[in-house]
Amino acid sequence: MSQDWPLWEVFIRTKGGLSHRHVGSVHAPDGEMALRHARDTYTRRLEGVSLWIARSSDIVASDPDQAGALFEPAADKIYRHPTFYDIPDVVRHI
Amino acid sequence: MYTTELGKTDGSLAQISQEDPALVEAFEARVAADEFIEPKDWMPEAYRRTLVRQISQHAHSEIVGMLPEGNWLTRAPSLRRKAVLLAKIQDEAGHGLYLYCAAETLGVSRAEMIDALHTGRAKYSTIFNYPTLTWADIGAIGWLVDGAAIMNQVPLQRTSYGPYARAMVRVCKEESFHQRQGYEIMMAMCAGTPDQKAMAQDALDRWWWPSLMMFGPPDDNSPNSAQSMRWRIKRDSNDELRQKFVDITKPQADHLGLEIPDKDLKWNEARGHYDFGAIDWEEFYAVVRGEGPVAKERMKARREAWEQGAWVRDAADAHEAKQRARASA
Ligand SMILES: [Fe+2]
Ligand SMILES: [Fe+2]
């Protein structure tokens, strides 16, 4: 059985002004080849204007089991949202 | 679907009962609430294995599906048809790759999956073990086989495993052209000479029943479907999808002036659906067992393509090694 090439994550900017978004991954021996594979695999129909490639093993991800501890505190800090503050309707442009 | 053992689940309930009941319960609740499960989330081992099997079989089917069509590339009747067929085949390669990636997120390697296919351990859709005898078969495949695949794949865009669902969204966007180009071939043949129309009819005669079998065994003989439905891996039953396919396809055949090879096919006013004849499941299981007319030929072609492409992979490796050596020099 042959050995897999390293895995690379593929990000596409669908059009100017938008940020790159993850679309999938490809196997390739190096970054340059990964870019070619990504082009053939993910952009056959004008899906993008720019590609980013990153080695999957270089991505540091948060642990789903920690999602509560990481993201929930925001829910009890509602004063971070503009709707928390009562401003009379007569006061304009605020 | 492009899997031959649709709805089959792996692992027994006994195994699940050894898993932490709190984790299982939380998982079941998330799935029941239509949440997506992502690669690093906890999941029951049976769920993981069922998905690995289903997604890898689906991927293999996309890859093997290129072979019968590839046979016709050099014999396409015009440059336009050739360009279209080439584009469709490239899409199928892409579908295979999206799906392999999705399966890999469950901890199985690409090399393992390819090895399983090439050594005959893995299954792929039985539909590709039928021969493509004339150009009309390319029309019938696009119309019926891709049509049935679409019907199966659309609900999978909401399947519970995130990477599989996202791969299906991409696939579904691309499938519609596959079916339309096939139907267009059929329209051209049906508007041609009597011989050409007869070829179109012959292709429909041969591809109709295998296409209906693509939806998998009947619901009352699909014991593990319930588990897959509960886990939201599968979202519609085999028989529901098959009925939907028949209902949609019959008027399309009428428009072509072709006759579906089923004397029991008729509109049932009371049900609001077409009734249709019994499927020969013995034939289906024979083809699943690898007794399809061209099963051996397909695997031989697939292995040859892999072996004959080895020099390209070797060259890419050598190039990478050279670049690395230069960079560190
Ligand atoms: Fe496909
Ligand atoms: Fe297709």
Image (cartoon, coloured by chain):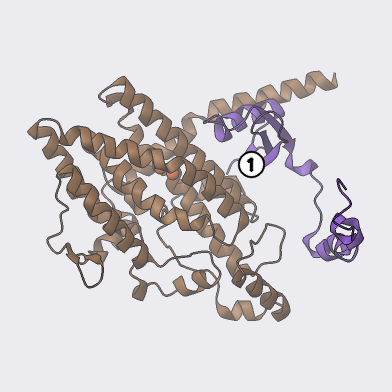
Query: In the image, what residue occupies the spot 39% across and 54% down?
Result: B151
- Horizontal relation, residue B250 to residue A20: left or right: left
Most foreground residue, B122 or B37: B37
Which lettered chain is shown in purple?
Answer: A
Circle 1: element type: strand
User: What amino acid is at disc 1?
Assistant: Val
Query: In the image, what residue occupies the spot 36% across and 33% down?
Result: B70
- As drawn, the residue found furthest toward the front would be A90
Q: Is residue A22 visible?
A: yes
Query: In the image, what residue occupies the spot 40% across and 68% down?
Result: B237
Q: Quadrant of ligand 1?
A: top left
Percent position of residue B5, x then y = 42, 62
Residue A22: quarter of image: top right
Q: Quadrant of the N terminus of chain B?
A: bottom left
Q: Which residue is mark 1?
A: A23
Most foreground residue, B237 or B293: B237
Disc 1 residue crowd, few under 14, some 14–19, many 20+, Cα 10 Å: some
- Horizontal relation, residue B256 to residue B169: left or right: left
